[in-house]
Amino acid sequence: MIIYPMKTVKIINLSHQSLTINAQVCDKFIPKLLGLMFKKTIDPKFGLLFKETSETRLNTAIHMFFMNFDITVLWLSKDLIVVDKAWAKKWHPVYAPKSPAQYTLELHVDQFNNFFIGDQLKVVNED
């Protein structure tokens, strides 16, 4: 079995400073491909952060095939500003941001009302 170690970061919503999420960075092909597929649950204070090389709508689109639960999806600009968000339903074919994004943040569905378009986020390394 191949193991892909992922870096853990803290994501702080600077627009609502009491809100902090721990996230694993998915920056390799297999972790990006798998994401949260086949997982049984996700912790309410945990997420996955996907990074692309540039702002794009196509490469930050997600699918929900093989998902066992709904999630909150945030799309972030290169400057970590929320440009779009969605309540993504399990088994839905595709979700894409309305505006180009460089980052995609997948969170527990309960986080949907804690983030708004225009919020400024900060990523802090755990190292």
Image (tube, grey):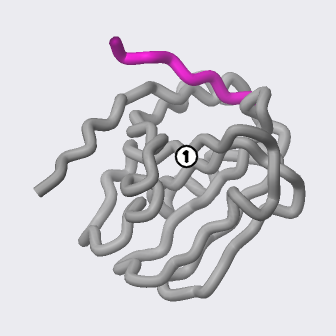
Dominant secondary-structure state across the stretch colored magenta: strand
Relative to 73, say whether 23 is above or below: above
Going by the numbered disc 1, the residue's amino acid type is Phe
**Quarter-wise, where is residue 79 in the image?**
top right
Q: Which residue is mark 1?
A: 50
> Quick one: 59 or 117, which is closer to the camera?
59
Residue drawn at 66 percent across, 52 percent down: 74
| Disc 1 secondary structure class | strand
Coordinates of residue 110 in the picture (x, y in percent): 49, 59
Residue 24 picture quarter: top left
- The residue depicted at 55 percent of the width and 46 percent of the height is 50
In x, y percent, where is residue 47?
43, 47
Q: Is residue 22 left or right of residue 80?
A: left
Which residue is drawn at the image coordinates 62% and 46% (left, top)?
Answer: 114
Instruction: Please provide percent x and percent y for residue 9.
Output: 42, 26
In magenta, the rendered stretch is 120-127
Q: Is residue 60 left or right of residue 57?
A: left
Q: Position of residue 95 (x, y in %)?
A: 69, 73
Q: Is residue 125 above or below residue 27?
A: above
